[in-house]
Image: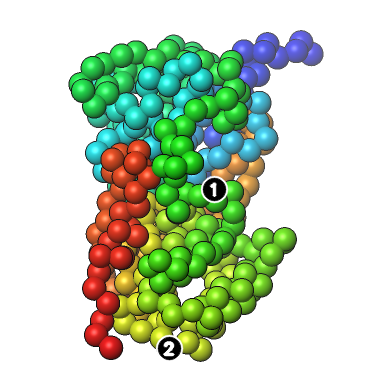
Amino acid sequence: MPATPPAELRVQRWRADLAFLAKELPARHKNLFFHLPREEFEAAVEELDEAVARRSDDELVVEFMRLVASAGDGHTSVQPGRGPVAWTRLPIRLRKFSDGLRVVAIARGREAALGAEVSAVGGVPIDEAWRRVASIVAHENESALAAFAPGDFEVPFLLHGLGLAPDGAHASFKVRDDAGKESDLDLDTTPSPNTALGLVTAQTKEKTPLWQSHPDATYWFEWIESSKLLYLQFNSCRNDAAKPFAELCAELFAAADAHEVERFVVDVRRNGGGDSTVIAPLFQGLGARRKLRAKGHLFVAIGPATFSSAMMNALQMRAGYGALLVGEPTGGKPNAYGEVKSFELPHSKLLVQYSTKYFDQVPGDPPSVEPDLVAPLSWAHWSTGRDPVLEAVLARELPAK
């Protein structure tokens, strides 16, 4: 029997992956069609199957991501997995602020672009480029897009698949500085493949705010004597093997008992979730210390990257301990699907994550958990090392004793 030509074999494998996805995702998800009608999903699968031979690998990965993201479940998405497609990042880091998509880090030698606002990608105006990227990001609200879409602008093969780059290794950005001057950035993956090494950031040691001072820590705390503020950053709902969360909480509450704490801030702005029960030692300590949880003394910092179990923990602290939520709306939706499992597509090895449980936590159907005190993060805050959340917390008058 003659061997199957490579081009034909490639098409067969992508179609087999699509068929596997179309069968397994509805069967495994708790309720895949809660937002997207089954008929639309099946029509999209049929249309993509017919188009496989005319699509590049980059375009097909993007189409798989768009298909799964259309379910409207922030926990149900396509991830890199073990496949042959290299999810290599460009030597640029972007962040969405309240006043635009900005360059927060870039390759050495291109420092003039730091802080510039992105106005176009691959010659496409940013509003349209953002719409295209948003179509492949699993999200439930606009806050989630603000948190997660910028990272996809840094992956050239995704930009290529979206018609925003000439190939899977190069991309161009038009950026505008605060004086209104525009310039072009042509980047490729050669200088620093899949790593931040060699990048220059817009922040210096003097300009790094407290909440970004330990970027790799799972959790940490600090007592700030000058403002009598106890600050805990809880970055992941998991136990660090080097120091379980219960151990850190023992140190935290020892510090709380040794000082006259006026404000206690629990910061989950960088927490994307995990195991919602890991926080239990914190709740136990709060339950035993009436003063720490007294009205107007306990605050929880939230933002677009607050998701899943971290969002649930923020709600628990507001409902059970009277905490005031400060910051920006969460990237997670309070009533939503979660409890993630995954499966691998047989040929591309793309990883498909899906939800197995529905969480009903608040009345109605709000798109996000809204803060009690609104404190949006702007480029001006970031570039000068200011933290709008701590500013809001410290500006709030303490309750009369």
Q: Is residue 99 left or right of residue 387?
A: left
Give amino acid for label 2. Answer: Arg
Please name the residue that numbered disc 2 is placed on: 290
Q: Residue furthest left?
A: 180
Marker disc for residue 246:
none
| Residue 178 in view (yes/no) | yes
Between residues 48 and 281, which one lies in front from this camera angle? 281
Q: Residue at x 32, y 26 (%)?
A: 116
Measure how far apart labels 2 and 1 are at the Cα level: 31 Å
| Residue 73 in view (yes/no) | no
Give amino acid for label 1. Answer: Pro
Binning the other alpha carbons within 10 Å of mark 2 as few (below 14), some (14 to 19) or many (20 upward) gives: few
Residue 392 place in picture, x, y as percent: 27, 61
Please name the residue that numbered disc 1 is placed on: 215
Q: Is residue 279 left or right of residue 262?
A: right
Residue 57 place in picture, x, y as percent: 54, 21
Q: Residue at x 65, y 19 (%)?
A: 9
Coloring scheme of the render?
Answer: rainbow
Q: Quadrant of the C terminus?
A: bottom left
Q: Residue at x 31, y 48 (%)?
A: 377
Instruction: Specify the quadrant of the image occupied by residue 245.
Output: bottom right
Residue 322 place in picture, x, y as percent: 35, 80
Residue 380 place in picture, x, y as percent: 28, 40
Q: Secondary structure at mark 2?
A: loop
Q: Secondary structure at mark 1?
A: loop
Q: Is residue 286 left or right of residue 5?
A: left
Binning the other alpha carbons within 10 Å of mark 1 as few (below 14), some (14 to 19) or many (20 upward) gives: few
Between residues 275 and 256, which one lies in front from this camera angle? 256
Q: Quadrant of the N terminus?
A: top right
